[in-house]
Image (cartoon, rainbow, N blue to C red):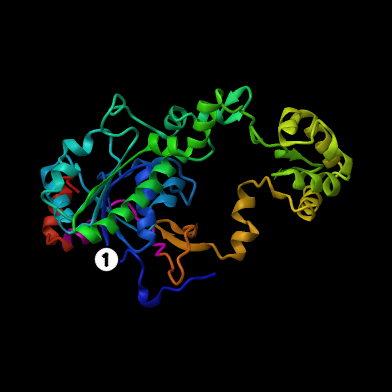
Amino acid sequence: MTATTPNGIRPLDGIRVVSLEHAVAAPFATRQLADLGARVIKIERPGVGDFARGYDETVHGQSSYFVWLNRGKESLTLDLKDAEAQAILHKLLADADVLVQNLAPGAAARMGLDFDTLHPRYEKLIVCDISGYGDAGPYRDKKAYDLLIQAAAGLVGLTGGPNEPSRAGVSIADISAGMYAYSGILSALLQRGRTGKGLRVQVTMLETMAEWMNQVLYLGHYGGKPPARVGASHPTIAPYGIHRTANGSVIFSVQNEREFANFCEIVLGNRELAQDERFSSNTARVRNRPELTTIIEDRFSTLTVAQVEELLDQAQIANAPMNDIEGVWNHPQLQARERWRKVETPNGTVDALLPPANLSGVEPAMGAIPALGAHTASILTELGYGASDVEALAAKKVV
């Protein structure tokens, strides 16, 4: 499955992205662009940098978040409150294709970095703004973090067990916003190719999560009540979820009556159970889920995970083990499809997953994770600053 990149060509080669980014959403978007060949210049605060650098110290003393989100970027430190730093930024924007920002509400506009201000000066520049709630409406000035948006969009109320709501286990609101920003930027590049003019891409975390919640919103609004919170089970399908075996748990899903008949005969060894009125339709099975779960787990109590998986495969029932972190890291499918690559960091080499979209003939760039300010001198030199100028800017803490 190893791809090749003829003549070193990638889809976004030659595209320059300047990003005023921190945390997750914007860095996730720009990392996708970097993997496709874009030059991404990440603006960071001198001496501090993206605060995600300090979230943890688990990857060779570096933040797992930062290592995940920032490969292939150049780090330029600028104190954007300083006029000289603003001048440097505008030198970059003069030749940039895309500006991405997820600063605090209103911060970009206060610095004159909003689309309406920039567009007359840089007609071809695409400006992507990522925020919690957008720049209009009663929530426009409200801070937004992943958990808060999960809650505001109804996901927390939908997730967890009957007695306790829960957040999703990963930063899903940030990730969804980052992916919509990425696809929005690609769409804007296509549009600019037709019109010659840049446009604004606006993405809000609330709106991305509301989109992902839309089926549930339909179900609850038009159905008159929200779906039940049933942990890892499915609120409207049974059996569907985690079931215990003699040495662990397995998760599987029965989708229709044919599959349930196969499940009863091959997995449970009880063909007649499919005709039991308590379980003879999906609606009946959902209504009688506790009784069905007891029957299933009584059978599974004498079997190992491997044995249950083998029976489920024989019955052509979709299933998977409940993997822990190492189980995913060493997943045989990821190994067989050669999904891991080596990436350099300031503190040594780490393994990194390829991006999920596989483009034939294209190997993602998978560049190094930058140290804070690692590219400041080289970028300033490229912009025409001499060595003494760079030293003076550093001494004044402009960079």
Question: What residue lies at 71% left-to-right and 32% top-to-bottom?
Answer: 283
**Residue 83 belongs to the span the image colors magenta:** no
- Residue 78: x and y, percent? 21, 47
Amino acid type at mark 1: Gly
The answer to whether residue 151 is seen in the rendering is: yes
Question: What residue lies at 31% left-to-right and 51% top-to-bottom?
Answer: 372
Magenta segment:
365-381
Please state, as top left, top right, bottom left or bottom right, where the N terminus lies in the image.
bottom right
| Quarter-of-image position of residue 313 | bottom right
- Residue 158: x and y, percent? 55, 29
69 w.r.t. 243: above or below: below
**Residue 373 belongs to the span the image colors magenta:** yes
- Residue 381: x and y, percent? 17, 62
211 w.r.t. 362: above or below: above
Question: What residue lies at 64% left-to-right and 32% top-to-bottom?
Answer: 235
Per the image, the residue denoted by label 1 is 14
The answer to whether residue 301 is seen in the rendering is: no
